[in-house]
Amino acid sequence: MPERLAIHGGKPVTTEPIPSGVHGPSVIDEREIKAVNDVLRSGNLFRFVENSNVAAFEKSAAELLGVKYTLMVNSGTSALICALTGLGIGPGDEVILPAYTFIATAAAIVAVGAVPVIAEIDNSLGMDPADAARKISPHTKAILPVHMQGVPCSLDKLISLARKHNLKVVEDCCQCIGGQYKGAYTGTFGDAGAWSLNYYKVISCGEGGLVFTNDYDVYERAAFASDPAMPMWMSEKEWQNPPFSRQCYRPSEVMGAIARVQLAKLENILSNTRRLKKAFLAELDAPRGYTPQFVDDPNGECGISAAIIIEDPNLVPTYAEALKAEGVSAGTVYNEGFPDRHIYRYWNSILFKNSPHRSNYPWKDPQYRGNVEYSPDMCPQTLSILSRTLRFGFNVNMHDTHARLLASAVNKVDAALG
């Protein structure tokens, strides 16, 4: 007989709180403090100084990723904008993105004057290649897959789809810094990749981003997009593309100094989270009432999250309530009225085609010949999956025993309810 659940008067799996925490900020120590103090004492806060921290971070990131060109900017959104600009994406173009990602992904597409086309996700919680194929139109110029919560999406299929239709690929790795897919880092499979160094990411300098690519033209155009004065720092002989002016997304030396130290801690962070997730998975019994999130490359993921997809939608609230009573906080990713900006249904500025200009740009731009329509219910597969998804996070403040307690709670609840 299944063990009596805590919600029915049984003994909970744990009464001690599971440690919470973010990743990069949780490992801040005297090294980051010294790096910032050194910058402040030097008085050199601008990135274009000799022995720049920003340039050193870019160089180290390029060496880690095995790419030729990297560009630090002031946010992950900016990184996506610069990557898209670098690839020549703009007015008249459509870009396909998944229905489950932060609204910044869609906002970056709009920022370059292109139109977001929202595709379903599958059980990987990443873009569904089959639906992405259905969403391709004569106006599609790029696909923007997102590696959510440290889990690479089905890259093989998406890259193959893009190449078949001669589409550009920008990989959104903002939540997957250090993640790998079949032996190479995420972000290096497409034409450009993007990191976010936001407070909640794997490594952080508060805000910040990185664009990376192996194509010099993409890099140079991204650099111009990041700094309207960029050509002024270069001689006419240095650039290969006609210079242009866009917004300013330059980072400061303070951001570069923190990011440089954090990057050196990346492997240690990931070794911890990967170990925790392996301990969690090893403790799980065979599922009865749920399906585990599909992970295409278990060895390459960051290990910062795990998800289970409950088969019976009516039991999802009961699973969540029962887990909470066992001492484990787990909520569904999507519920009616829950304003998670990672789900397309809550991207009101996109769904309502709100524009900052009376021209209703980019949807009514004269160069755009398509007619993309949105509605809150346009991706039923996505809403079905997310409404049944329970997610668990792993962070550097946890120990293996905590990961095993999470699994024990899942086993207990699933045995009783599944």
Image (cartoon, grey):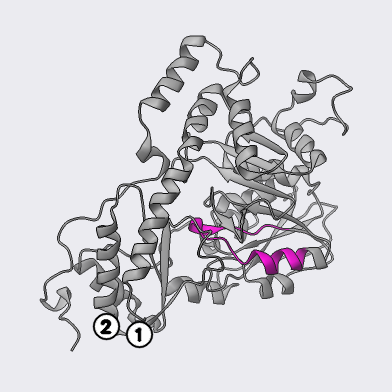
Vertically, is 278 above or below 396? below
Looking at the image, which residue is at 70% across and 40% down? Answer: 82
Q: Quadrant of residue 59?
A: top right
Q: Is residue 191 left or right of residue 266?
A: right
**Residue 186 image position (x, y, % from top left):** 61, 53
**Residue 334 image position (x, y, % from top left):** 43, 67
**Residue 4 image position (x, y, % from top left):** 15, 81
Vertically, is 209 above or below 237? below
Query: How packed is label 1: few (under 14 Cα within 10 Å), some, or many (20 or more)?
Result: some
Q: Which residue is mark 1?
A: 288
**Residue 418 image position (x, y, % from top left):** 32, 85
The amino acid beneath tag 2 is Ala
- How far, Cα to Cα, is label 2 from label 1? 7 Å
Looking at the image, which residue is at 34% across and 65% down? Answer: 280
Would residue 393 be visible to someone looking at this image? Answer: no
- Look at the image and tell me in which quarter the N terminus lies: bottom left
Element class at badge 2: helix
The amino acid beneath tag 1 is Arg
Which labelled disc corresponds to residue 415? 2
Looking at the image, which residue is at 60% across and 68% down? Answer: 375
Q: Is residue 151 left or right of residue 319?
A: right
Q: Which residues are the magenta region?
A: 143-162
Q: Give the mark, 2 or 1, whose residue is nearer the N terminus.
A: 1
Residue contact at pointers 2 and 1, CB within 8 angstroms: yes
Q: Quadrant of residue 212?
A: top right
Looking at the image, which residue is at 60% across and 58% down? Answer: 146
